[in-house]
Image (cartoon, helix red, strand yellow):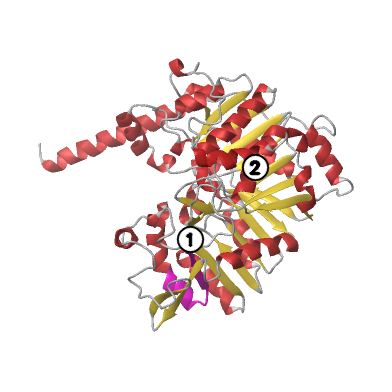
Amino acid sequence: MPLFEILVVCAAAIAIAGLTGLTSYGSYARRALGEKSTALPVADGDTLLDREVVALLGDRRGETGLQLLADNLQAFELRVQLARSAERSLDLQYYYWLWDLTGDLLTQEIVAAADRGVRVRLLIDDINTRGNDSRYLALDGHANIETRLFNPSRNRANGIRRGLELAFRAFKTTRRMHNKAWIADGRVAIVGGRNIGDAYFDAARATNFHDMDVLFVGESLPDVQSIFDDFWNSPVAIPIGALSRPLARNLPIQRKASRRRPPDAEPYLQRLSGIAAADGISRIAGDLHWAEEVEVISDPPEKALAVGQRSWLVPRIYRAIREAREELRLVSPYFIPGKKGVQALGRLTAGGTSVRVLTNSLAATDVVAVHGAYSSYRKPLLREGVELFELRPNITRERPSLFGSKGASLHTKAFTVDGRTGFVGSFNFDPRSASLNTEMGVLFVQPELVAEVNGIIDEQTAAQHAFCVTLTKGRLSWTGGAEAARIAVLAEPSASIGRRLAAAAIGLLPIESQL
């Protein structure tokens, strides 16, 4: 048989196998869907959080109270606080949940809530769950906990079959749920950039993230609850019990805080011992900023099926940015603006708007591939008058990590417009967030809260925390911190040769749309 015919036959066989796999998966997913459920109704006095929020709202009809969570340890403590205060429901939606010290501690809290009779719904994107089915099944085995995986692989254990499935469903498996939400009793929610894991809560030994969440109560709560329900009941959210082998379903739930408690974790655990369920949210009530113009915005779950583009998050975010007249401050750890993004920011600067962007330096980023794609846009951005800053990997910390880490990486996704409008969420300014992942966040008009966000951005773009990137005679240079002298373009500050070579090589590949 001629080589050409052999190639045609092989291509046809692969196409048929792929089509068969897709059809099989779709039929399976429809059969595996769990029963629909929605948020439990709130009441004025049924739970502690009901009573506290009703008292806080008072005559603030139509308003939302917001608090910025920029401190990692506070962000962790408030999640613990809400889990311990909940008496009706916990709805939790995350891109991933690591089974490390803080992940185990928060697992203990949700199990304790379920033991008290709280209904827990846990929705996790499947991309990072491999090897952890037994843990999710154990949680799902609790009478008051239900666990679902978003856009999951059907093959859970066999590496070859799983690899083939991922290959045949490549256009679907690359679409992930990047949302992050923690909702207690339908009364208090935390939405933002943090996943569940040590690096997000100042518990990592090597590097901890700079990140932001927003805690809020009031008028916007039904919106975030509705978003959760839409994802929970979507055709791509499959119960873990329908995916894994029955033998693993009766595993005991791990009620101890952690499999390992290193001695230097003790200060961390001592702080948590002071959190009482009876405190509710009273200890942060005075820190709430009240606003009438608050939107909880999200991609629909259908984005994972590549449909419903008109209702995707991007148009609303870009519309808010285009309204900038005086200043735009934008923070994105993974920043790939594309040609259209560069042009859009250039139009703002041409109109007299000050545009400042903070992202990771090559030495600080946890995704070198993204930096490789971003690096080609630095010169065009600078030529358009955009101020460009890159976070340093080693910074001076006001409060040292409880584990001694001085390493830093940026994970905040936020922007502010004209000192009046702000956004905090999960949306990165890159092709993946725009076109592939589902994202969410809180868009608000509240000058005092915006001032808090800007204060943190100002601090993080200061010379001791970030490199200022400029153009000198057509060449990139970095200034700031210990690297006071200008550095040539080929020597990105503090980055190893291996990182530089990897970023440069990736920058040449046609994979930007997947980053």
For residue 375, what is the image quadrant? bottom left
Answer above or below: position of 129 versus 478: above
**Res. 30 visible in picture:** no
The residue that label 2 is drawn on is 77
The residue furthest right is 59
Where is the N terminus found, in terms of image quarters? top left
Answer above or below: position of 368 versus 242: below
Secondary structure under tag 2 reads: helix
For residue 451, what is the image quadrant? bottom right
Q: Residue at x 72, y 35 (%)?
A: 276
The residue that label 1 is drawn on is 335
Indicate yes or no whether the magenta region holds residue 69. no
Q: CA distance from mark 2 to mark 1?
A: 30 Å
Q: Residue at x 67, y 34 (%)?
A: 83
Closer to the chain start, of discs 2 and 1, is 2
Mark 1 surroundings within 10 Å by alpha-carbon count, few (fewer than 14), some (14 through 19), many (20 or more): many
- List x then y, in percent, for residue 85: 73, 34
Task: Report the mark closest to the observer, 2 or 1.
Answer: 2
Q: Left or right: 400 with respect to 131?
A: right
- List x then y, in percent, for residue 438: 54, 46
Give the extent of the magenta segment.
Answer: 378-393
Q: Left or right: 14 with respect to 473?
A: left
Which amino acid does the dot numbered 1 rest on? Phe
Mark 2 surroundings within 10 Å by alpha-carbon count, few (fewer than 14), some (14 through 19), many (20 or more): some
Answer above or below: position of 216 versus 51: below
Q: Nearer the viewer, residue 270 or 305?
A: 270
Secondary structure under tag 1 reads: loop
Q: Left or right: 316 with respect to 149?
A: right
**Res. 425 visible in picture:** yes
Which label was assigned to residue 360? none
Which amino acid does the dot numbered 2 rest on? Glu
